[in-house]
Image: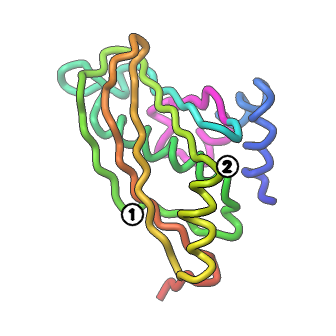
């Protein structure tokens, strides 16, 4: 078990380890640091991550920037996958992302994503027994603090066993 996987497991039941996870993630993924993402909750059932309404996340009309919202969707699904699949055994990499925007974000937003164990087994783990890689698109809604549906992200991930990865 990796240190990250271990920390995520501890964060599931502890506000201290959730705080520590947020600190580690802001240092381990420095290009996400300006967004100030905050893991609100990461449990075996779901992952919830917040994106604050702050100047570094704003666009030219003072709403949260579309790219920050897309990154929130990618990050939330990615954290869920890493919490359920060992990154030491599988390479998890973004293939593409598609966004549908519904409402302008003028306050804090959150993305909450759930990956049921049955779906994980049937769509990812079992197919990897016979296939070199699988692609799966996950849908993730984003809501603001007033419960307005801001956007929906469609995040397509490739999952592959490390032994099947070719870097040449």
Of the numbered discs in the image, which one, if any, rests on residue 123? none
Residue drawn at x 25%, y 39% as measured from the top left: 100
Of the numbered discs in the image, which one, if any, rests on residue 95? 1
Location of residue 85 by image quarter = bottom right
143 w.r.t. 94: above or below: above
- Magenta extent: 23-42
In the image, residue 118 lies at what x, y percent? 62, 54
Q: Nearer the viewer, residue 78 or 57?
A: 78
* Residue 144 as seen in the image, left or right of residue 116: left
Of the numbered discs in the image, which one, if any, rests on residue 83? 2
Q: How many marks overall?
A: 2
Q: Nearer the viewer, residue 113 or 20?
A: 113
* Residue 68 as seen in the image, left or right of residue 120: left
Q: For the residue carrying disc 1, how many other residues have a C-alpha within 10 Å: few (<14), some (14-19), or many (20+)?
A: few
In the image, residue 53 lies at what x, y percent? 39, 19
Q: Main secondary structure of the magenta part?
A: helix
In the image, residue 101 lies at what x, y percent? 24, 33
* Residue 20 as seen in the image, left or right of residue 73: right
């Amino acid at each position: 078990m990796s240190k990250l996987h271990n920390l995520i497991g501890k964060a599931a039941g502890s506000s201290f380890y959730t705080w520590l996870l947020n600190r580690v993630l802001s240092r381990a993924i420095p290009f996400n640091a300006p967004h100030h993402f905050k893991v609100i909750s990461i449990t075996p059932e779901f992952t919830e991550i917040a994106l604050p309404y702050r100047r570094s996340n704003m666009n030219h009309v003072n709403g949260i920037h579309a790219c920050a919202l897309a990154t929130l969707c990618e990050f939330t699904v990615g954290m869920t996958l890493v919490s359920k699949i060992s990154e030491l055994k599988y390479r998890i990499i973004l293939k593409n992302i598609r966004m549908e925007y519904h409402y302008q974000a003028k306050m804090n937003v959150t993305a909450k994503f759930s990956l049921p164990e049955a779906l994980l087994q049937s769509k990812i783990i079992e197919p990897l027994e016979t296939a070199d890689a699988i692609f799966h698109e996950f849908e993730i809604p984003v809501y603001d603090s007033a419960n307005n549906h801001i956007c929906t992200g469609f995040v397509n991930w490739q999952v592959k066993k490390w032994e099947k990865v070719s870097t040449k």
